[in-house]
Each structure stands twice: as C-alpha cells, then as structure tokens.
Amino acid sequence: MPEYVVEFGKDGGPVEPDGRLDAAAFHRNHKPIWTVLEAFLEGKSGDVLETGSGTGQHVVHFAARSPEITWWPSDFNEGHLNSIAAWRAHAQLANIRPPLRIDLSDPAWCPEMHDGRGPGALVAVFCANVIHIAPWRVAEGLIAGAGRYLRPDGKLFLYGPFKRDGKHTAPSNAAFDASLRSNNPEWGVRDLGEVRQLAESNGLRLAEIVELPANNLVVAFGRR
Ligand SMILES: C[S@@+](CC[C@H](N)C(=O)[O-])C[C@H]1O[C@@H](n2cnc3c(N)ncnc32)[C@H](O)[C@@H]1O
C-alpha cells in the first residue's frame, strides 16, 4: 500500500545537516511525472508554480531539465519550506525562486501573487500527492487559484491516485483510501469526476489523463 506523508523528516528519516529532506516516493515517481510535464513545457518559457512541494526534490529535478522555465516552489509547512530552500541552495539553479508560503485552503494563495513579488500569469501549476492528504477545501483553493492565475494556454497538473466513476482503480488504492480516512475523516482518495466538476466551476476543462505506474494518474486541466 502506498505510504502517505504529513510531514517529511518527522519520523526520524534521514535529514541532511543543511535541512534537505528526502521523500521515498520522489525516487519512484519523478521520472514518469517529468515525461508528462516535459511534453507540455517543451518550447515554452515563463513561470511554473508547484504547490505542496514537500521536500523540494521535484522542483529541483524539473528545473534542471527546463532552463527556460522559472520554477516557484511552495508549501505551508515550516519544515518543508526549510527543506525546499535547502534543496534550492544545494542545486544552485538560476531558475528556481525561493519557496512561497501558500496555504491552499486560501483561494487567493498568498500576497506575492498580487503584489509583484510572485510569478506572473502561470504556464502551469503542478501539484503532486496533496489533495487526498488534505481536506476537500484544499482542492477547492488549489483549483480556484489555478483558475485565477493560469495564463490562457496554461495547465494545472495533478498527480496522485484517483477514483474513477466513484470506484477505486486498484485494491491498493482502496486500502490506501481507508487508511487515509481512518487517520483523518476529511482526507481520502478523490473521485476524478468530482475534481472535474470543481475544475469546470472554476473555468477549467479536463484536457488529459495519463496513467502512471502504481495506479497513479497525472490529470491535466486547461482553460475552457
Ligand atoms: C504527501 S506530501 C507531498 C509532497 C510533494 N508534493 C511530493 O509529492 O513529494 C503533501 C504536501 O502537501 C502539503 N500541504 C498539505 N496541506 C496543505 C495546504 N493546506 N496548503 C499547502 N500545502 C499543503 C504538505 O505540507 C506536504 O508538503
């Protein structure tokens, strides 16, 4: 069964002296996720924002492969913000900005989105493994913000497990869902149809569904 994480490093997992945390799942999922993002980002330039960045490893991996893109990582957890900053310092890449503190349950995201210190209209928003390990209002805030801040040809990419037509796609996802809900009744694997409805009510339409290993999907939404 896939494991879930509320706070990296809290379980005594290895932490680099500079604050860099390591997520086991990153090593399994970053390559297949990048194949999807790379196909979309090829030939584009501009700002991409990652929400719920966690350790910061994804943004470093992706930024190293897309010098024309400016990457903006974000999270709301202090330890994770420190880890993202440490990975950024370690990577020494010119195209990663300091992490933004974004609590996705606020659809306005953060003051920097409005006061000139943050990104411009976004080429993409990328969010991995967040909406099932958070209350539904986090999905609401994420998608409302994407509807507001994506540029006309921009896309929102969600990665993680999803139910389809109200049903789990694998027994392992059903067991994962049960363990999430037993930990917090507000969490749980989301139904793609409900996420799609939420996106549509924010001016976004389902553009692509890509099946990735371990019964996870990348789901992309673009402007209607
Ligand atoms: C399972 S981790 C996934 C981290 C990373 N995206 C990855 O795939 O390795 C979930 C992340 O969502 C973040 N998160 C949870 N609730 C959030 C909220 N309301 N606003 C912003 N981030 C949130 C957590 O701090 C954590 O970093």
Image: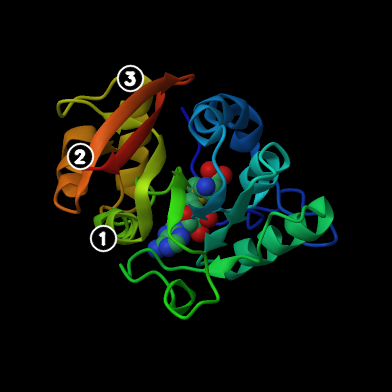
Give the colour scheme of this rendering.
rainbow
Camera-side residue of 157 and 43: 43
Alpha-carbon neighbours of circle 3 within 10 Å: few (<14), some, or many (≥20)? Answer: few
Residue 194 appears left or right of 84:
left
Q: Quadrant of residue 175?
A: top left
Q: CA distance from mark 3 to mark 1?
A: 26 Å
Camera-side residue of 18 and 6: 18
Check the image and report above or below for 178 versus 127: above
Check the image and report above or below for 110 versus 194: below
**Cβ atoms under marks 1 and 2 closer than 8 Å:** no
Q: Amino acid at mark 3?
A: Pro
Per the image, the residue denoted by label 3 is 171
3 or 1: mark nearer the eye:
1
Camera-side residue of 189 and 114: 114
| Quarter of the figure with the C terminus | top left
Alpha-carbon neighbours of circle 1 within 10 Å: few (<14), some, or many (≥20)? Answer: some
Q: Residue 137 has which mark?
A: 1
Say which residue appears at 29% left-offset and 53% top-offset. 143
Image coords of residue 54 (percent x, y): 57, 53
Q: Amino acid at mark 2?
A: Arg
